[in-house]
């Protein structure tokens, strides 16, 4: 039996979605904007992968319910990641920008 990429359940959203960071209907934010997928990108991914539960970042300051739990979980996991918060040139890394976007 040959390997079939289309049936691989472990493909990333980048491979599934059209990777665009510029223009109307883009699916990803730039590093300067905090990185991550846009609402359009998440909708595109979910349409291509029925049953998936991919969601956008929780960016509000005081979320409630499940959104608060997602934010708390993300911040706890991401803050513990190894790696610097700044690049050698002084600019923040993707890790730092993601944490800032989630208001961690």
Image (spheres, grey):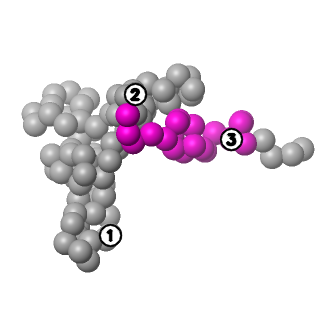
Asked whether residue 61 is drawn in magenta, I would say: no
Q: Which residue is mark 1?
A: 82
- Identify the magenta region: 5-23
Apparent side of residue 24 relative to residue 102 in the rendered image (left or right): right
Q: Secondary structure at mark 3?
A: loop
Report crowding for label 1: few under 14, some 14 to 19, many 20 or more residues within 10 A (C-alpha): few
| Residue 25 against residue 8 in the figure, above or below | above
> Which percent across, then down, holds residue 95?
29, 59
Residue 25, numbered circle: 2
| Residue lying furthest front | 23
> Which percent across, then down, holds residue 20?
45, 40
Examine the image and state in which quarter residue 57 appears.
top left
Q: Secondary structure at mark 2?
A: loop
> Label 3 vs label 2: CA separation?
26 Å
| Residue lying furthest left | 62
Report crowding for label 2: few under 14, some 14 to 19, many 20 or more residues within 10 A (C-alpha): few
Picture residue at 14% right of the left edge, 34% below the top: 60
| Residue 40 against residue 78 in the figure, above or below | above
């Amino acid at each position: 039996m040959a390997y079939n990429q289309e049936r691989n359940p472990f493909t990333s959203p980048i491979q599934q979605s059209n990777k665009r960071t510029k223009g109307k209907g883009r699916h990803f934010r730039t590093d300067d904007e905090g990185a991550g997928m846009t609402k359009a990108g998440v909708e595109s991914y979910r349409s291509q992968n029925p049953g998936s539960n991919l969601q956008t970042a929780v960016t509000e300051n005081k979320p409630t319910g499940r959104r608060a739990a997602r934010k708390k979980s993300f911040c706890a996991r991401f803050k513990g990641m190894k790696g610097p918060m700044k690049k050698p040139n002084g600019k923040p890394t993707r890790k730092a920008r993601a944490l800032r976007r989630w208001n961690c």
